[in-house]
Image (cartoon, rainbow, N blue to C red):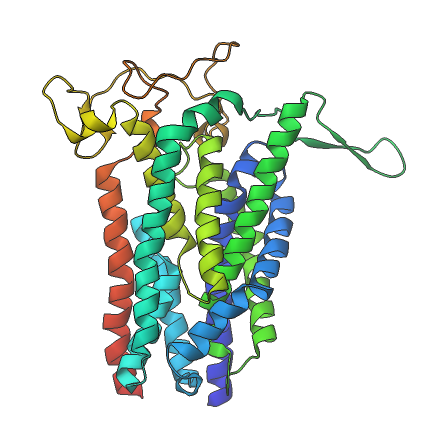
Amino acid sequence: MVSLLTVAGIAVAVFVGFNIGGSSTGVAFGPAVGSRLVRKATAGVLFVGFGFLGAWTVGRNVIATMSSSIVPAAQFTPIASVGVLFFTGASLLISNLYGVPASTSMTAVGAIVGLGLASGTLNQALMFVIVSAWIVAPLVSLAIGLVVGRYLYPYLDRYVAFTKFDLHFVQIDRSGTIPRPYLNQNASPQDVVGSLSVVLIGCYMAFSAGASNAANAVAPLVGEGGALTVDQGVLLAVVAFGLGSFTIARRTLETVGDDITELPILASLIVSVVGGTVITILSYLGIPASLAVSTTSAIIGLGWGRASRAATLSELATPTPERSELDVATGALVTSRAEEAPASPTIGDIARHEEPAEGSEAVPDVPDIGAEGPADLDERSLFDPAAAKRIVTMWVLTPSLAVAVSYPVFAVLL
């Protein structure tokens, strides 16, 4: 009976890791694949490699927290392990059904909390620290995105451009006996630097995803008396990531996701760096947290900051009837008007195989904050209060449901 449950636990862990690999590969390397800097197979290889590096190093701390610190390792019986992994896998289904980047990490911890409450072994002090981090991390990402969007983004967008190549950035010359790689002849030195930045940031996101998500797939199976050692757990998680990266990720790499496709590539790189850094720090501290939540918070902050450039701080704080174009309570534009095309192509243009709007060859001036005009705004990627409310609601709801559903189940089984 125990062996069958162990096999079931490993199977569910592979399922969870498979879905994580499929979704995270698209998030990490969607910009690089869409702009033809790397191929899908190369993206899979890079994601698995850097995901393994993140899981093997920083990810161990998160595995230790989730496998033995929130509740004692002895509580992860074969039945309990399968139950926790089941609820974690169910969170992925909920996320897909509602189209919201719900946190697998937060839901996995919620299921473990249900186990701890049912067994009376929950480490309440540690949970206070974890929940505090869940509140602070998105706020930090939001604040950084807001500051960058309001004060720095227009200047970055003025000088940084990413070319959409008709052919892949790296070509292969097969005319000789040994294939020889060479760079696309249309690539300028600026393109080379920008392209390397896109790929390197994708690798960094893969590292962060491995560090934060390996525990979600295998933590209940690892530890004292568990079915796997930490090393075995990391390897199992990475293999499962790879299965998703080379299969279902091919679709996510093409679509990149309906809610994020309209971000300019520059904006997607900014939010990737912000979200990845916040999660890497928390993972180093052994705190399970969501890469999706931090990244999405940075997206909201960046859009909100860009939208708020249409008014000065004093104007935002003092609503006036004359400023009908700006909702000062949300920082979002509320009337439609023609917007200037972003200097760099959006991921949506690339995913739909559309050419970005042509702009002037001259470098445009950056309008001052509060100046009349569009002020370098792209309404498709600005702050949407309704979407933000829906996303935050799901962030709170999914782990709460995990606790509410898992508690009575574990109370009966234990």
Toward the viewer: 293 or 371?
Answer: 371
Toward the viewer: 60 or 409?
Answer: 60
Q: Residue furthest left?
A: 321
Give the x, y percent position of residue 172: 76, 34
**Left or right: where does residue 3 sit relative to residue 297?**
right
Give the x, y percent position of residue 274: 45, 45
Answer yes or no: is residue 100 visible: no
Query: Does 24 sit above or below residue 377?
Result: below
Query: Does 126 sit above or below residue 360?
Result: below
Toward the viewer: 160 or 252?
Answer: 160
Rendered image quadrant of residue 116: bottom left
Give the x, y percent position of residue 196: 63, 36
Query: Does 385 sit above or below residue 214?
Result: above
Rendered residue at 35%/24% (across/down): 378
> Quarter holding the C terminus?
bottom left
Rendered image quadrant of residue 164: top right
Q: Residue furthest front?
A: 314
Number of numbered discs overlaid on the protein picture = 0
Rendered image quadrant of residue 382: top left
Rendered residue at 34%/29% (across/down): 306
Give the x, y percent position of residue 258: 38, 39
Toward the viewer: 242 or 279?
Answer: 279
**Left or right: where does residue 149 sit relative to residue 212?**
left
Answer yes or no: is residue 356 visible: yes
**Left or right: where does residue 128 sit relative to residue 20?**
left
Rendered residue at 38%/29% (across/down): 151
Rendered residue at 26%/86% (across/down): 412
Q: Residue furthest right?
A: 177
